[in-house]
Amino acid sequence: MRFLTSGESHGPKLTAIIEGFPSNMPIDKERMEAELIKRQGGYGRGRRMKIEKDTFTFGAGVRHGKTLGSPIMIELTNDDFKSWTKIMGSEPLTPEEEENMKRVITKPRPGHADLVGGIKYNARDLRNVLERSSARETAARVAVGALCKELLHSLDINMTSRVTQIGEIKDEGEYSYSEIAEGANQSSVRMISDEQTKKTEELIDTAKKNGDTIGGIVEVIIENPPVGLGSYVHYDRKLDSKIAGSVISINAFKGVEFGMGFKLAHTPGSQVQDEILYSSEEGYTRRTNNLGGFEGGMSTGMPIVVRAVMKPIPTLYKPLMSVDINTKEPFKATVERSDACAVPAASIVCEHMVAIEMARAILDKFPHDNFEELKQAVEEYKERTKNF
């Protein structure tokens, strides 16, 4: 399975094309759009989320609620484009229009792709860079991930996400999967604790008042994954490696860990490895899940637990110093619309990037020309691994 997205932040639309899904897979479009709505939510979000509706249409590959087995096209209209038609239109400009073009950007923002992208692609108007490098593109990725979650859901593989930290405020309590799945969606910051939610809202308000931004840590949990997804045979087939790469591809994400993660550095090996158990009802399980559901780059069948850190958004309302690429004079960086905190929304993006890699691993391992063939193959494999 592979996919591509296209589109700019203030362009007409975002598009995704996904190849490799089985035919006859049922799709709940309303459930998919609910995932896109989650991405738009969260305390600290900016005005853009009030403009965009983020509903989508299937342009190809789906008929009467089921996949055809051919490439699937998803389109999301950018409602804000109506205010940017001249600035972001595809038609050539006259010399006069080019000279009077509004919102040309020549002052790169620290922490963004602006300067390096401008140098790489020889873009004298840095809007050519920031329009594509914008986190708006993640809406298309969430749509792809929502499609992947439809596949996983149909195979009885469930997943959820939450926020475990924003700024210095943590919510790392031990919660059941159902508590996380329900609690995160009821919290404005996707934390489970009501007390920590309130403290975090106050922290975000303070940052916004100061023209600053805050980062944090998100967690994704997958229940009931099959054993043996991924491979130890080659470095580029290890599933935890693929998940880590996809998570780091999300705007502003700077680190990934599985299970105990970086705590492993100061924990004795005797307290780290997950002891193996067996029962005729469940097959092989582990006494603990310190390694986050992975051994040798392969899923163990235990819940997969992924955490990732997001840096504070670099677009600030008290902009940092930069240099104008035309005059080479120091200036304060350009201010674009921004969020004081996008960590809650980023947890949804992270969840869907992990869903994409999980769906890809499933489709890599099992025959999947049609959905019934895939479902039968997964069920038979699970039964065989239980009795290994």
Image (spheres, rainbow, N blue to C red):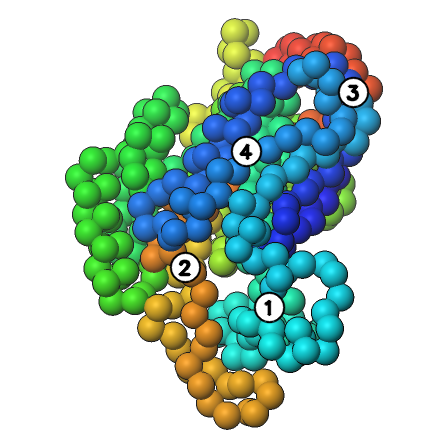
Q: Which residue is mark 4?
A: 55
- Determine contact: label 3, label 1, CB under 8 Å: no
Q: Which mark sits nearer the N-terminus, 4 or 3?
A: 4
Please tell me the numbered disc located at residue 68.
Answer: 3
Q: Position of residue 112 (x, y in %)?
A: 52, 68
On screen, residue 358 above or below 209: above
- Whether label 2 touches label 3, CB < 8 Å: no
For marks 4 and 1, the one nearer the N-term is 4
Q: Position of residue 231 (x, y in %)?
A: 71, 37
Q: Give 135 or 271, whichever is nearer the viewer.
A: 135
The answer to whether 273 appears left or right of 129 in the picture is left
Residue 40 at x, y percent in the picture: 44, 41
Spatial distance from mark 4 to mark 1, Cα to Cα?
A: 26 Å
Marked residue nearer the N-terminal end (2 or 1): 1
Tell me where residue 11 appears, x and y as whole percent.
Answer: 62, 53
Which circle's residue, 4 or 2, is located before the other in the chain?
Answer: 4
Q: Nearer the viewer, residue 382 or 337?
A: 337
Which of the pair 351/14 is nearer the observer?
Answer: 14
Q: Is residue 176 left or right of residue 197?
A: right
Residues under labels 4 and 3: Cα distance?
A: 21 Å
Amino acid on which disc 1 is placed: Arg
Residue contact between numbered discs 4 and 3, judged by CB atoms under 8 Å: no
Circle 3 residues within 10 Å: few <14, some 14–19, many ≥20: some
| Residue 106 image label | none
Q: Nearer the viewer, mark 4 or mark 3?
A: 4
Residue occupied by mark 1: 127
Question: Which residue is the site of mark 2?
Answer: 338
In primary-sequence order, the first of circles 2 and 3 is 3
Q: Amino acid at mark 4?
A: Thr
Q: Amino acid at mark 3?
A: Leu
Residue at figure coordinates x 47%, y 82% from the top left: 322
